[in-house]
Amino acid sequence: MKTILNLTTKKQKVTDISPQVLVFLNNVLVDELVVTESPSFEIEQDFNFVDGWNEINFIIDDMCWSDLDGSSWTFDINSLTVDGLDKFPVTRGQGLTPFQFKFNPADVVIEVENYDETTVDSVHYQQLAGKQIITDCSFGFCFKVENGEIVDHYHLGQDLITANDTLNVNTGTFLKLFRMAVKSEAPGVLVDDFIKLVNDSTANQYWGLPIVLRKPKNLDVLVNFCMSTPWESTRIYRQYNDNKIPVELLLELLTPPSN
């Protein structure tokens, strides 16, 4: 599958060193290239995805960042396409319609070595959240393929970042507000008929999303509460960190997808 990662690469000060990118597919090195300065630097690969999960990993080296002088280079991730598509499914569980999420650079997770002298296991994970890449790091994407089509995906390391339990609200408050919304339905309905907080889906395990099965008639209280505080420490739409998420995006996360 033809995969193109597009970056804006910029040299911030005079240096004779250019960064390089190592490209891995399923832990096998498939390419290495030297980065040049460009508003649209493309890393293009025709990956031979296998059935099941495929892991793409990009390792960036020689960014020449220093404590005294800061960054020599900066990278912005602009887009990722696979066979010309930039919108990919995220499964919600067996028998449920997947979400379809457009690739969002702000949600990409970078892995940075801490160079701890006492252990080599000291690694830091953070989402870009609209920031630039300024130092050596790695990041990647996981795609599940069945019969030659992508059926699921997540960002590598997405389950390792610090994130709020449920859509910028702690789980207990979220459930109370959701239960209030369900009360406007017919008598005797169960909250379990409308939502699952936990299952083994990619949407839940990696994207941190509750699995809404049916949308209650009245979500106003929950939506208004979520909209009343800045969006932060979530695993999705991180470009809105410290700001208010648009209500239409919040509703997208609270409304069960349909075919």
Image (spheres, rainbow, N blue to C red):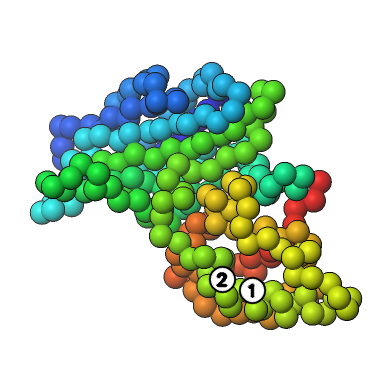
Mark 2 and 1 residues: CB-CB less than 8 Å, in contact? yes
* Residue at the image point whose x is 43% and y is 28% from the top: 43
At x 61%, y 57%, the residue is 198
Name the amino acid, label 2: Thr
Residue 105 coordinates in the image, percent (x, y):
48, 48
Visible in this render: residue 198? yes
Side of 120 where 259 appears, left or right: right
Q: Amino acid at mark 1?
A: Leu
Q: Quadrant of the N terminus?
A: top right
How many marks do you count on the picture?
Answer: 2
- Could you tell me residue 234's position as x and y percent? 49, 62
Label 2, on which residue?
171
Which residue does the numbered mark 1 point to in the structure image? 175
Residue 32 occupies which quadrant of the picture? top left
> What's the mark number on residue 43?
none
Q: From this viewpoint, which residue is outermost toward the right?
A: 186
Question: Does residue 218 lie above or below 132 as drawn?
Answer: below
Q: Secondary structure at mark 1?
A: helix
Q: Nearer the viewer, residue 216 or 171?
A: 171
Helix, strand or loop for disc 2: helix
Q: Is residue 252 left or right of residue 49?
A: right
Relative depth, front residue between 208 and 1: 208
